[in-house]
Image (cartoon, coloured by chain):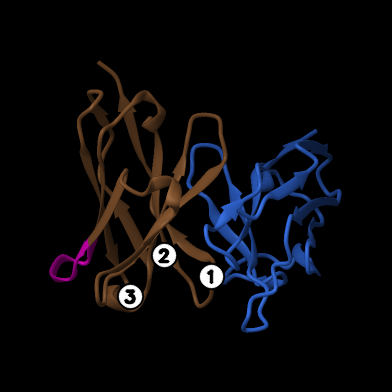
Amino acid sequence: DVVMTQTPVSLSVSLGGQVSISCRSSQSLVHNNGNTYLSWYLQKPGQSPQLLIYKVSNRFSGISDRFSGSGSGTDFTLKISRVEPDDLGVYYCGQGTQYPFTFGSGTKLEIK
Amino acid sequence: QVQLQQSGTELVKPASSVKISCKASGYTFTSNYMHWIRQQPGNGLEWIGWIYPGNGNTKYNQKFDGKATLTADKSSSTAYMQLSSLTSEDSAVYFCARRGGGYYFDYWGQGVMVTVSS
């Protein structure tokens, strides 16, 4: 199985600040069709996960441009700028390139 | 708008089975894969498998082979997951999630908490 390693496990940021979350995969996430199926999700407290970013850098409908994704191959990053109170929760990366689909263990974002 | 409405909390006994549902609305049910994902208490996310309601095809994470059975009813736009031979390890929240245009999950149900206890 593809192992997804997220760092850090948790981080604390002031409102208005910027954070980066790293996600590394144990194998390349480039699919046979040339796409890279790396996505990012946010699970707010008591809620189900919501899609933020798909295929590395594409923002899902309605997602603020404060969220941006980058990376390639096995190394990916989610950046959140101008952090707002509603951004708190656990962020997961996930891969859909190889079966079984797998997720990182999550990064908990707290607001200082 | 796309909505996935899941059934309610389940408290079940060890060695029994449970069937949970996920009713889809706001899109063509038969045109999108439906995935199921598990979240054990305090843990991350585990992919269980998918069903394509258009033809009933399924694919499972080997880890859940024999544990989970996915079905879909086109007439009611509802996907189901049956979990069998339940143990305490199966206590978790189970989400259904629609596959988007690629291999990612664009809409999620609210989750069903399944507790296995005697």
Number of marks: 3
Residue at the image point whose x is 72% and y is 71% from the top? A57
Alpha-carbon distance for marks 3 and 2? 10 Å
**Regarding mark 3 in the picture, which secondary structure is present there?**
loop
Q: Residues within 10 Å of mark 3 (few under 14, many from 20)?
A: few
> Which numbered disc flags the more N-terminal residue, 2 or 1?
2
Note whether A73 is above or below B116 in the view shown: below
- Labels 1, 3: front one: 1
Which residue was labeled with disc 1?
B103
User: Badge 2 sits on which subunit?
Assistant: B
Furthest toward the left, the residue is: B75
The magenta span reads B72-78
- Residue B112 in percent (x, y) is at 34, 41
On the same chain, marks 3 and 2? The answer is yes
> Which numbered disc flags the more N-terminal residue, 3 or 2?
3
Judge from the rendering whether residue B112 lies leftward or rightward of residue B47; answer left or right.
left
Which residue was labeled with disc 2?
B98
- Residue A37 in percent (x, y) is at 63, 70
**Colour chosen for chain A:** blue
**Colour chosen for chain B:** brown
Circle 3/circle 2 CB separation < 8 Å: yes
> Which numbered disc flags the more N-terminal residue, 1 or 3?
3
On the same chain, marks 1 and 3? The answer is yes
The image quadrant of residue B1 is bottom left
Note whether A19 is above or below B43 in the view shown: below
